[in-house]
Amino acid sequence: MSVEAMSRLRLVGLKSDKNKIMRILTHSGRFELSRSTDYSGTVRENDASHLDKIVARQVKVSFAIDFLYALDTEAGRIADSDAREVKKGGKAKLDFEYKPLARGQSVRAEVNEDDFNDIAASEYELLAVCEALEKISFRKADIKSERAKLRSRMAALEPFAGCPLPFSFAGTSSTSFILAYAASNAIVFEPKAEAYTERFDGKYNCIGVITARGDEASVRAQLSAEGFTVSRFDGDFTAAEAISECRSGDARLEKENIDSIKTGLSYAKYLGKLKVLYDCFALEIEKAKAEFELSKTASAFIIEGWVPKCRAEETGKLLSDASENIVYRFSDPAAGEQPPTMVVNPAPVKPFEDITNLYSPPAYGEFDPNPVMAVFFFLFFGFMVADAGYGLLISIAALFLLKRKRFESGTARLIALIGICGISTVGWGVVTGGIFGISGIPSLWFNPIEDPITMLAVAIVMGVIELLTGYGIHAYKSFKKKEYVGGILDVIFVFTLFIGVGILVLGMLVLDNALVQSVGTYAVLGSIAGMMLAGMYGKKGIGGKLGGAFSGLYGIVNILSDVLSYIRLFGLGLASGAIALAFNTLGGLLFGIPVVGYPLGIIVLIPLHAFNLGLSLLSAYVHNARLQFIEFYGKFYDGGGRLFSPMGRCTKYIVVKSGQTK
């Protein structure tokens, strides 16, 4: 339950062993690279061409993976359309058996090291697959473009489909033939010049106008002015013939597109290997980037980085077994160095680390607040939901999900966190008699609806306990720094203030004793005076001391504000129970309906309670985190750490399991 001590690794080796050493450190999962020192006589890598080549190959693989999924999506869409068409008695377009690709991978697959190396060795074969898919994608793009042109041409020809004359017909030696159409059938062309007009059958208002050649220009101008579009086509074919040709071409291209999908999906058998190769390149990119962090000479290289102290001996053995031509040393962090942070906590506390990390990881060497924060987060979460039925549901659901399916570590920790907090929710539900908001269930202590004052008091007391814990940790950190006087003055009067308030409340509300009330009053006044004097400590001059006294007095306002913040525990807990009770009341009205009442009530209540549960969980998580970040951590926590990020964890699709054989 602490921030793990780190050791700095410095290693010098021959260039011939560099790739082997980098591979061991990367696959160990326990080494974080840092920029090595610029020793005299060393240089750094400045040629990025190797890195660029690896990135280019990874981009090829990434495109191939995405393209296979795009083909799968397109094939699925066509298959759905085919199913509807066949149901109507039509014909399917796909001429092959379509099997959807597996999707929705929630966790990276585990690949043993031998299989990983075998796939990495088949790089050129898999890159040939990528190139084949790339060619298919280019052809598909051409097909799409050609089909778009054909459809655009058909759309332009469609208005003239009713005309039986070829577009090449332009009239006689003395007359002109003009073909035009209007978007609306309501438009009637009445030529001002002498002309003959013929309307052709069809869904468009298509007309042919025969007029004298001398009047052609005026007729064209009138047609344009009245909303007609004159044909610009030319050729010895009719519109219907051209449309038929376009449709034939579109059908041919559609068939070619289907064939390209079929050919492309035939490479789906390589999808798993392509994903492994993608991550192989990811690791190679990581190592290539690491080259810029190393110091080198003509024949040697220097690596520096961080290894958890508890794994230093094991890591050293791996390095020694790998090569005799290396020299390495583990050392403690030097003054001014900022090692990465790796916290070590028992399994029940691990899920709560993500809450702290949302705020800021602890700095190296700082007190790890997670075990203490986890207790309060656990209690507050259950208090704000306070329903045994809800808690049982979320705990069982979390356990079911974690047992039946593998998740990435972050998702798994979140599910585990909700499941653990479900236990607290069950406990508080039993204490308050809350089970799905059903009224009349006896409580072990108090019922929030019937006795809200007790619930408010419990919320404030829990808040005060957390605040005092925060002040206590602040004193502990001050003592570790040997700031004994400052540590005592910062917290002692805060403790006596709360003790005095407690005695005063006890004397007023419980014992009704004037003497106890007086003791509480004097304790409160003495604490206020003490806080003002503590604020003056270390200040110079009359102005500084007065300012310090005022600052100490103002601190009381902050303490009051902190205490009042914990009223949200009461408000959210009461709201959750009240909403559940209101929903049950609504359901009770439906239950009174003869015959269909109970089925209808249950159908209505399930989504309503699901909504209340979701809202309660979200509120409990967000407001709980807010209390920890501001009220609790604000008393002692510095943060500002950087999480330990070892090499070898940059993969997207797989996790390489070391030390396994096929």
Image (cartoon, rainbow, N blue to C red):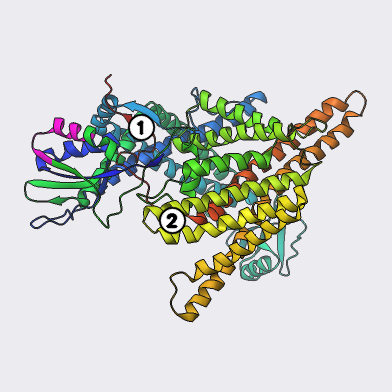
Amino acid identity at mark 1: Val
* Quadrant of the rendering where the C terminus is positioned: top left
Which callout, 1 or 2, points at the residue further toward the start of the chain? 2
Asked which secondary structure carries label 2, the reply is loop
Cα–Cα span, label 1 and label 2: 34 Å
For disc 2, the marked residue is 638
Displayed quadrant of residue 526 = bottom right
Residue 581 vs residue 656, the one in the foreground: 581
Q: Position of residue 605 (x, y in %)?
A: 78, 33
Is residue 325 on the magenta stretch? yes
Residue most extreme to the bottom: 542
* Amino acid carrying mark 2 in the image: Asp
| Quadrant of the snapshot with the N terminus | top left
Residue 487 falls in image quadrant: bottom left
- In the picture provided, is 175 more to the left or to the right than 414? right
Residue 319 appears in view: yes
Q: Which residues are magenta?
A: 315-327
Q: Residue at x 50, y 51 (%)?
A: 472
Where does the image place residue 31, in percent across and percent down from the top left?
27, 41
Give the percent coordinates (x, y) of residue 86: 63, 24
Instruction: Quickly name the residue at label 1.
Output: 655
Does the stretch in magenta take in 177? no
Look at the picture and state if 589 lies above or below 458. Answer: above
Mark 1–mark 2 contact, CB under 8 Å?
no
Q: Residues within 10 Å of mark 2 (few under 14, many from 20)?
A: some
Q: How many marks?
A: 2
Viewer-nearest residue: 32 or 654: 32
Q: Position of residue 46 (x, y in %)?
A: 18, 56
Residue at image coords 55%, 65% = 531
Point out the frontmost of discs 1 and 2: 2
Disc 1 crowd, CA 10 A, few/some/many (<14, 14-19, 20+): many
